[in-house]
Amino acid sequence: MTSPDAPESERGRRPVKPRRDLIMKAPAMYYGLTVFDVNYFTALIVGLISDLVAGKAGSIPTSVSLKITANNNVVINEHGVGLPIEHLLEAFPDGNFTRNASQSLIEHSLDWLYTGGRMRKDDFGYLYYEGYLLNLLSTSFEVKTWHMNKLYRLGYEQGNVTTPLTLQPESIELSSSSGSEVLIRPDLSLVSATHLEGADIALKLADLQLQHPETQIEVDVYS
């Protein structure tokens, strides 16, 4: 892997931390939609799952499920991929990190973006990019990932970490040795909406299932 802190001439990108207000004022700069409304959340959720099942994080999940509850909580479960728990210096031993060198790759992916494209999911996990934006635009964002039958948790509120990546004492019995769960509470007040467009999300994921039959995609949308 090329170090995320390598010179810009080597990578053609640098770490940035866009603020919520900047994303709201210039949405197209960050995700291609010219209007910041509830469809922005739709695009981010579908884009995250699309990249996941396409294997952009380095492997393909056996199954993915999406649940949208009556109070607009979004729960994404996947089996077979998981999220990287290694620290930056473990993954990039030749890197020259000047900040947060002890961060895990999951935490780094939710704290920083890199200019020059969205091609870093193979380094930082499937939450990279869409996860950063969803985290910043949500009241809370919680991650569970399991690795070698060990469970790790990570939590944010308003884009700020409240629970650092922590190994949990619970034992886990799963059909696969890796997987993850993400609980997102989008801040719909930002787009003056009362609910997510669940039917539209379900329709887009049904089309995604046709494109990727190797992964079982389940959708449970409150209506």
Image: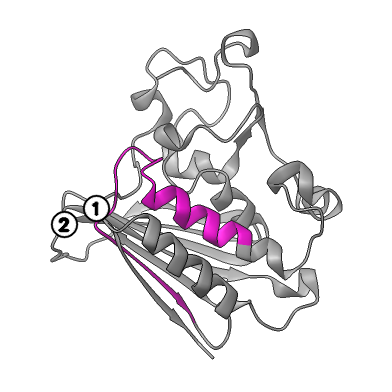
Q: Please say which color scheme the image uses.
A: one colour
| SS at circle 1 | loop
Residue drawn at (24%, 53%) of the image: 80
Task: Point out the stretch of residues depicted in magenta.
Answer: 43-68
Q: Is residue 64 above or below residue 94?
A: below
* Residue 41: percent from left, percent from top: 65, 64
Alpha carbon distance from label 1 to label 2 = 6 Å
Residue drawn at (38%, 33%) of the image: 87
Tell me if label 1 and label 2 are in contact, CB under 8 Å: yes
Q: Return the mark for residue 80.
A: 1
Observer-nearest of 176 and 220: 220
* Residue 222: percent from left, percent from top: 50, 87
Residue drawn at (60%, 38%) of the image: 112
Quarter the N terminus occupies: top left
| Disc 2: which residue | 176
Kind of residue at disc 2: Ser
For label 2, count other residues whose C-alpha is less than 10 Å away and answer few (under 14), some (14-19) or many (20+). some
Q: Is residue 79 above or below residue 115?
A: below
For label 1, count other residues whose C-alpha is less than 10 Å away and answer few (under 14), some (14-19) or many (20+). some
Queried whether the magenta region covers residue 63, the answer comes back as: yes
Ranked by sequence position, the earlier of labels 1 and 2 is 1
Queried whether the magenta region covers residue 59, the answer comes back as: yes
* Residue 6: percent from left, percent from top: 55, 14
